[in-house]
Amino acid sequence: MAVQCLDDPATMLQKEWCISALSKDLRGTLHLSDHKTHQCQTPPCKTLKTVHQVKLNIVGHPPCDSQTAHVLDGVIKIDKLVTVFDQDGQHRGFHAGDFTWQGAGSTQVTGRISGVTNVGTHRLPIFTDCQKCDAKGVMEGRLCGQIASTSTAALNGCQVMAAYRIKFDPSLTGGQGDVSATLEGVIICSCQH
C-alpha cells in the first residue's frame, strides 16, 4: 500500500515538525517491459499504456543536501512504473509507481512517485526559455515516502516529500535506456519534545 503524502493543512498546523533538506542527483536505467495501445470511441482518443522498471543510484547534491539526508544516498527501485500517453510515447502522459529506496546501512524508504510525462514547466514567461511546454523525455512529479527502517532511530517513521525531474530518451513506445534525474525536497519528522 502506498504511503499517504503529508499534505493535510490541519495536521500540518496541529503538530510540531522538524524539517531537513533533501537534495539528490540520480542516474540509472529505464527498462520497458510492456506497452499496448487502446482506441476509445467516447470520447474519441488513442492512448499508449507502458510499464517500465526503473533503477536509480542516488548521491547527495551539496550544498543543499542536509547532513540528515546523507543516510538516503543509495538506490531507488520501481518495479512497475505505469504511464498512460495521449497517442504515443512522444505525447503528453501521466505516470505513477511504487518504489523501494535503499539508503545507507539499514535505511529503507517506501512510497510512490506520480506526475506527468513529456512536459516542461521551466519555460517562458516565468523562467528563461530553457524548456518548451511539451519537452520530450521529461517526467516531473512528486515523490512521497516513509522511512520504514533505519539505524538512525530519530528518523524511523519520518516522511520524505520531494519534487523530481527525470530525463530519458523518448520513443514512440515510451522510451528506455539511461536516465538522469534531480530530486529536491524535505525529510519531515514529528517533533519528539
Image (cartoon, rainbow, N blue to C red):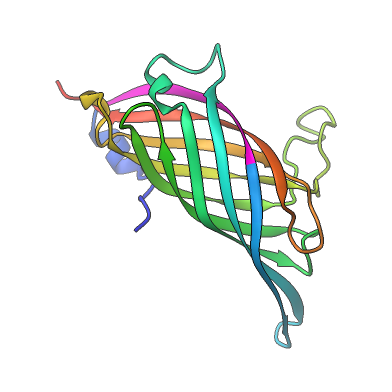
Would residue 96 appear left or right of 105 to someone viewing this image?
A: right
Name the main secondary structure of what is drawn in magenta: strand
Instruction: Give yes or no for residue 84 being in the magenta stretch.
Output: no
Q: Quadrant of residue 15?
A: top left
Q: Which residues are magenta?
A: 17-28
Question: The N terminus appears in which quarter of the rendering?
Answer: bottom left
Q: Is residue 28 visible?
A: yes
Residue 156 appears in which quarter of the rendering?
top left
As for residue 21 lying within the magenta part, the answer is yes
**Residue 179 location, x and y as percent?**
69, 40
Residue for point 53% across, 30% down: 58
Residue 44 coordinates in the image, percent (x, y): 76, 82
Question: Which residue shows up at 71% across the image and 82% down it?
Answer: 43
Left or right of residue 36, residue 90 in this image: right
Q: For residue 131, which quarter of the picture?
A: top right
Q: Is residue 141 above or below residue 17?
A: below
Farthest bottom residue in view: 41
Residue 109 x %, y %: 37, 40
What residue do we see at 43% from left, 40% from top? 101
- Relative to 60, say whether 10 is above or below: below
Is residue 2 toward the left or the right of residue 13 in the image? right
Q: Which residue is outermost to the left?
A: 193
Residue 167 can be seen, yes or no:
no
Q: Is 20 rendered above or below residue 129? A: above
Side of 37 relative to 62 (left or right): right
The structure residue drawn at horizontal position 29% and vertical position 34%, both measured from the top left corner, is 158
Query: Which quadrant of the figure contains the C terminus?
Result: top left
Residue 174: image x %, image y %?
73, 59
